[in-house]
Amino acid sequence: MTDASLTLAPPEADAGRRNMALLIQLRWLAVGGQLATIAVVSGLMDIVLPLPPLLAALVVLVLINLVSLALLGRGRAVTNIELTAALLFDVAALAWQLHHSGGLANPFASLFLLQVVIGAILLTPRSSWAIVAATLAALAALRLNPTPLLLPERYAVDPLGLYLKGSLVCFVLIAVLLVAFVTRISRNLRERDGALAAARQRAAEEDHIVRMGLLASGAAHELGTPLSTLSVLIGDWKNAPAVARNAELQEDLADMDGAVQRCKAIVGGILMSAGEARGEAPQLTTMRAFLTAIVEASRAGRMPGTVEFNDLFGPDVAIVSDPALRQVIGNVMDNAAEVSPDWIGVTASRDGDMAVIEIADRGPGFSEEMLEHFGQPYRSSKGRPGGGLGLFLLVNVVRKLGGNASVANRDAGGALVRIVLPISAIAREEGDAS
C-alpha cells in the first residue's frame, strides 16, 4: 500500500523559495523600468547614451532571472548563499550601468539603497553586511573614470535642475518598489506564521492520538483475558443439561456469545492496528467488499431496513484493508444510529481518483458549535465526559491517508458526514501479498 500521508514542506524551507520568487519579480520590474528609462532619455530627452553596455547589463539581469527560475524548478529550498549571490549580481549590474552613464553624477545612484534594504530583510546578518560592503565598493569604484553623459545644450545651462528631476524620479521609484516589496514580505510572513500555527496544531493532535493509541492498546491487552473467560463460561452454560433443554436461554446465550465474539474482534483489531499482531498477512480485498463488510457489520445488530447502502462507486478497485479506516467509518455509523435508530444512509461514489463516502441520518443534526469546531477532540453533542473522539479520530485517520472529512446538516433534516479519500492511498500494489 502506498504511503499517502501528506508531507508538507516546512514553512522555513519554503521561505527561501518565496524570497527568490520575489527577487525575480522585482528584477523583471527593474528590467522593464530601465528599458523605459533608456527609451525616454534617448528618444524624448535627446541625451546620447552608451546603449551597448547598458543593454548588456539588462541581458545579464535577464540571464540571472532565468537561472533563478531554474533554481526554483529544482523543487528544493533556496539557500541564503544563493539569495546573496543573486543580490550581488544585481549590485554589480547596477554599478556597471552607472559607470557608463555618469557615475555618481547619475541621480539613479541612490538605487543602491534599495539593494541594501532588500538584503537586510531577506538575508542573514552576515550576508546583509556583505551587500553593504559590496555597495560601498561599487560607490568607490564609480569615482574611477566614469563615462560622463553628453548633455544637449538646453540641459547644460542648468545641470543641477536635471539632476534634481532625476533624483525625484529615483525617489518615487525606490518608494514604490519598497512599498510593494515590504507589503509582499509581510504577506509571506503572515502565511508562514499561519503555516507554523497549523503545523503546531497538527503536531499536538498527533501527539494526542499517540497517547490515546497507547491507552487503547493497554486496554485491549487487559480486556483479552476477561473476554476469553466469558466465552468459556458461555460455552459451559450452553452445554449444561438444565440450560440445553431451555430454547429461550439457548437463544439468549447465542446472542451473548455473538456480542463477546464481536468484542474480541474489536480488541484484536486494536492490537493489529497498533502493530502487535504477529504473523498475520495484510488483508487484501476490494473497495466495494470493504464498504459492504462495514455496512453488513452495522446491519447485524439492527432492525432490517434501518441501514440503507447506495453503491454508486462504479468499477471496483483492489485495495488493502485498513483497520483504522474501517473502525472510524464504523464509529460514524454507530453515532448516526444512536440519534437515528430507524434509518441511516451510506452512499459510496467516486469522483475521479477519489472515493467519496457519505453517511447520513435523520437525527437532530449538528449544532453550530459542532460545525465550527469539527474535528477537535472532546467536542460532543452527547454531553458525555470524554466524548467527541469519534470525529476527531476520523479526521486524523483520513488526513493521514491524504484525504479529508467534513460535516454538514441535511436540508431534509439530520446530519451528513462526508469522507473523501484518494484511492491510491489504500490501493493494492503489485508487490502486495495475496
Image (spheres, rainbow, N blue to C red):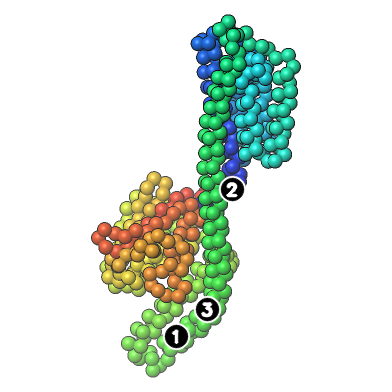
Q: Which residue is mark 3?
A: 223
In-front residue for pair 172/120: 172
- In three-dimensional space, the C-alpha distance between marks 3 and 2, rounded to whole angstroms, equals 41 Å
Tell me which corner region of the image, top left, top right, bottom left or bottom right, holds residue 145. Answer: top right
As drawn, 176 above or below 150:
below
N-terminal label among 3 and 1: 3
Q: Residues within 10 Å of mark 2 (few under 14, many from 20)?
A: few
Residue 381 lies, in percent from the top left, at 38, 69
- Circle 2 — which element? loop
Please report contact status of discs 3 and 2: CB closer than 8 Å, yes or no: no
* Residue indicated by mark 2: 10
Which residue appears farthest toward the bottom when viewing the image?
242
Q: Is residue 230 visible?
A: yes
> Which quadrant of the figure has residue 210?
bottom right
Tag 3: amino acid: Leu
Residue 236: x and y in percent read: 46, 88
Q: Residue at x 49, y 59 (%)?
A: 396
Q: Residue at x 69, y 37 (%)?
A: 128
Three-letter code for the amino acid on which mark 1 is drawn: Ile
Q: Measure the alpha-carbon separation of dots 2 and 1.
A: 56 Å
Residue 6, position as x, y percentages in the image: 52, 50
Residue 148 in the image: x percent, y percent? 66, 11
The residue depicted at 56 percent of the width and 52 percent of the height is 196
